[in-house]
Image: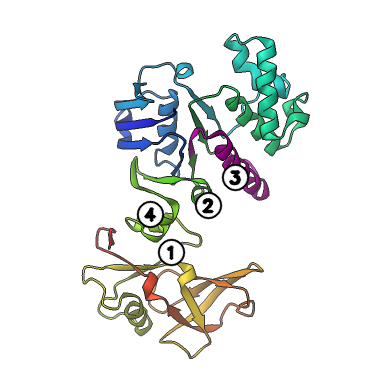
C-alpha cells in the first residue's frame, strides 16, 4: 500500500507554467526525495499529491485509484509542514489525536494510538505539555506524530527540518530514517538541502524549472549526473567545472584541461571534477600551479579554494587531515584524478 503514480502532471498559475509535465512512479515503502532550488516546483508537486493544489493536467494515482478529484482527507496521505502548525491551546496529546477525534474515533482508541506513536517518537513524557513548552525539535516530533496516528498510506514532508539548527537537523534526519525503517510506509520528502537528499532518500528526483532533470539512487546521481545542473546541485563544495580553453587561454588553463580531459570526446566543452578528487602538491610540483584564495580548516578535513590564472571561477579541493598549514596566498600544485572526471557537451549533457 502507498504506491503513487504521476502521469503527465502539469500545473499552471494563469499563464505561468510551474510544473511542465512529470511522469514518476513512487514505489510502496519507498523514501522518495524531491530536491531542487527554490521555485523549481517541488513543493507544488507535493501539494498536488496532498490535494492542496489542483492539478492542471495529467493524472495522479494512489494505490491504483485516480485521486485528482478525491478530497485531501480521503487520499490516505498525511502531510508534515515546514511550520509545525500545532494548536497552541491544546496539549501534545490533544494535538496528536485531534484528527482522530474529528474522524469520530472513540477516546480510548485515540489514547492508545497516541500513546503508541509517542513511544515510537520518544516523546511520551511530553504528552501533557503545551507547544510553547517545547523546543523546535520536540515540536517537529509532535507534528510528525500527528501524521503517524492517522496511519496514512503516504507521508508527505515539506522541508520539515529547515527551522531547526544544524545539530537538531542531524538528529532528526536519523530519527526520520529510523521511522521509515520501522513503519515501512511510503514517504515523499521535499527539501532544497542536498545533504538531506543524499543521506535520507532511497531515490532522489532532482527538480529544475518544473521538470525532473534526473531520477535515481543518491550515489548514482552523484557519480553519474545526467547533466551539469545535477552535477552542480549535488555535492558540497560544488563540483569544479572547467571550460575547454580557447585561443589565447593561459598555460595553467590549458594544462588543467589536458590533465582532466586526456583523450576525451572532442564534443566535450566542459570537464567536471569533484573537490575530493583534486589533490594538492607542494609548490613547484605537478604541471598546474594555483594560488590559495581561502583555506577552511574543519579539523578532520580542509576545504581549499584555489585561484588559477585564466579561470573566472575558483576551484575547490576537499582534503583530509594534515593540511592545516595552508593559508591564503600560498602557491600549490594541482594533481586532478582524471579517472573521476566528467565530460559535458555544449548543451550541458554528460558524455558517457
Instruction: Determine if the magenta segment contains residue 167.
Output: yes
Q: Earlier in the sequence, mark 1 or mark 4?
A: 4
Which is more foreground, mark 3 or mark 4? 3
Q: Which mark is residue 239?
A: 1
- In the rendered image, which quarter contains the C terminus? bottom left
Instruction: Determine if the magenta segment contains residue 260.
Output: no
Q: CA distance from mark 1 to mark 3?
A: 24 Å
> Overall secondary structure of the magenta stretch?
helix
Look at the numbered discs 1 and 4 and tell me whether their residues touch, using CB distance below 8 Å: no
Q: Earlier in the sequence, mark 3 or mark 4?
A: 3
Q: CA distance from mark 3 to mark 4?
A: 22 Å
Q: Which mark is residue 173?
A: 3
Residue 69 rendering spot, x and y as whole percentages? 36, 17
Residue 144 rendering spot, x and y as whole percentages? 61, 31
Q: Is residue 87 left or right of residue 314?
A: right
Q: Is residue 173 left or right of residue 211?
A: right
Residue 343 rendering spot, x and y as whole percentages? 30, 67
Which is more foreground, mark 2 or mark 1? 2
Q: Earlier in the sequence, mark 2 or mark 1?
A: 2
Q: Which mark is residue 230?
A: 4
Q: Earlier in the sequence, mark 2 or mark 4?
A: 2
Magenta highlight range: 161-189
Q: Is residue 162 visible?
A: no
Please name whichever residue, 333 or 176, is drawn nearer the observer in this view of the structure: 176
Check the image and report above or below for 46 versus 230: above
Please name whichever residue, 234 or 290, is drawn nearer the observer in this view of the structure: 234
Q: CA distance from mark 1 to mark 4?
A: 10 Å
Q: CA distance from mark 2 to mark 3?
A: 10 Å
| Residue picked out by circle 2 | 195
Please name whichever residue, 248 or 292, is drawn nearer the observer in this view of the structure: 292
Look at the numbered discs 2 and 4 and tell me whether their residues touch, using CB distance below 8 Å: no
**Measuring 49% from the left and 69% from the top, which residue is drawn there?**
276
Amino acid at each position: 500500500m502507498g504506491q503513487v503514480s504521476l502521469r503527465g502532471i502539469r500545473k499552471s498559475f494563469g499563464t505561468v507554467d510551474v510544473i511542465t509535465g512529470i511522469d514518476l512512479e513512487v514505489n510502496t515503502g519507498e523514501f522518495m526525495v524531491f530536491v531542487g532550488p527554490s521555485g523549481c516546483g517541488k513543493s507544488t508537486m507535493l501539494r498536488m499529491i496532498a490535494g492542496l493544489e489542483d492539478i492542471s493536467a495529467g493524472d495522479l494515482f494512489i494505490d491504483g485509484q485516480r485521486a485528482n478529484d478525491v478530497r485531501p482527507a480521503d487520499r490516505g496521505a498525511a502531510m508534515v509542514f515546514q511550520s509545525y502548525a500545532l494548536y497552541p491551546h491544546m496539549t501534545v496529546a490533544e494535538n496528536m489525536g485531534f484528527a482522530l477525534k474529528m474522524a469520530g474515533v472513540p477516546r480510548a482508541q485515540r489514547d492508545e494510538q497516541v500513546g503508541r506513536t509517542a513511544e515510537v517518537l520518544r516523546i511520551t513524557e511530553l504528552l501533557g505539555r503545551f507547544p510553547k513548552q517545547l523546543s523546535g525539535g520536540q515540536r517537529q516530533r509532535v507534528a510528525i506524530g500527528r501524521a503517524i496516528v492517522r496511519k496514512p498510506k503516504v507521508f508527505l514532508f515539506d522541508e520539515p527540518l529547515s527551522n531547526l539548527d544544524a545539530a537538531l537537523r542531524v538528529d532528526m534526519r536519523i530519527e526520520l530514517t529510523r521511522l521509515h525503517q520501522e513503519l515501512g510506509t511510503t514517504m515523499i520528502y521535499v527539501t532544497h538541502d542536498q545533504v538531506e537528499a543524499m543521506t535520507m532518500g532511497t531515490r532522489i528526483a532532482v527538480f529544475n524549472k518544473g521538470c525532473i532533470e534526473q531520477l535515481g539512487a543518491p550515489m548514482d546521481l552523484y557519480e553519474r549526473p545526467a547533466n551539469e545542473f545535477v552535477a552542480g546541485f549535488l555535492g558540497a563544495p560544488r563540483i569544479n567545472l572547467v571550460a575547454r580553453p580557447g585561443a589565447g587561454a593561459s598555460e595553467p588553463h590549458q594544462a588543467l584541461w589536458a590533465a582532466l580531459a586526456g583523450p576525451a570526446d572532442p564534443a566535450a566543452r566542459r570537464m567536471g571534477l569533484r573537490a575530493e578528487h583534486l589533490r594538492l602538491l607542494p609548490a613547484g610540483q605537478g604541471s598546474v600551479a594555483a594560488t590559495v584564495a581561502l583555506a577552511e580548516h574543519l579539523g578532520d578535513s580542509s576545504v581549499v579554494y584555489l585561484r588559477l590564472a585564466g579561470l573566472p571561477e575558483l576551484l575547490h579541493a576537499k582534503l583530509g587531515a594534515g593540511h592545516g598549514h595552508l593559508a591564503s596566498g600560498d602557491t600549490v600544485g594541482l594533481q586532478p584524478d582524471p579517472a573521476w572526471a566528467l565530460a559535458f557537451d555544449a548543451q550541458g549533457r554528460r558524455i558517457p
